[in-house]
Amino acid sequence: MSKIMRLTLFKIPEPAHIEEAIAKYSTMTKDAVKDGKPYILNAAASRPYDDPRAKGYTLVARTVFPSKADMDYYDTECAAHQELKAMLKGKVVDGPPLTVFMDMPESA
């Protein structure tokens, strides 16, 4: 079973809200627990370069999960992810974030 790499792109106009999200993602590997244990392998967020190719996205989050089942748990049951979503509610513009995920190459 391969690891899952997930990228989530947000359009958050306020710099202070972007910094809040970056700080929250930086603690996600210890805050997010499943069966009483941390389960996210890696989580980080940063600002993309201010470039027309960014299409208005102001924050990119990268999260690595041990499996697709763990990512599904994150989406449906994880209390830390629910806190993150509550923190960002009303701060993200132009619809929901863009989320893509893929098998993570063994070499990454």
Image: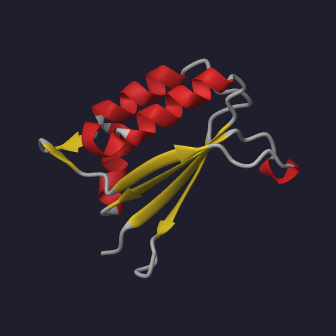
Q: Which image quarter: residue 76?
A: top left
Vertical arrangement, residue 5 with respect to residue 35, above or below = below
Quarter of the image with the N terminus in it: bottom left
Residue found at the far left of this picture: 36
Give left or right: position of 21 versus 68. Answer: right
Image coloring type: secondary structure
Instruction: Tell me which residue sits at (29%, 31%) in the image.
Output: 79
Residue found at the far bottom of this picture: 107
Instruction: Tell me which residue sits at (51%, 31%) in the image.
Output: 21
Give left or right: position of 36 versus 88. Answer: left
Residue found at the far right of this picture: 52
Give left or right: position of 41 versus 93. Answer: left
Q: Which image quarter: residue 78?
A: top left
Q: Position of residue 83 (x, y in %)?
A: 38, 25
Quarter of the image with the C terminus in it: bottom left
| Count of marks overlaid on the render | 0
Q: Position of residue 3 (x, y in %)?
A: 36, 68
Q: Position of residue 13 (x, y in %)?
A: 72, 26
Instruction: Tell me which residue sits at (67%, 26%) in the image.
Output: 15
Front position in the image: 73 or 4 = 4
Vertical arrangement, residue 67 with respect to residue 83, above or below = below
Residue found at the far top of this picture: 90
Front position in the image: 49 or 66 = 49
Instruction: Tell me which residue sits at (40%, 58%) in the image.
Output: 64
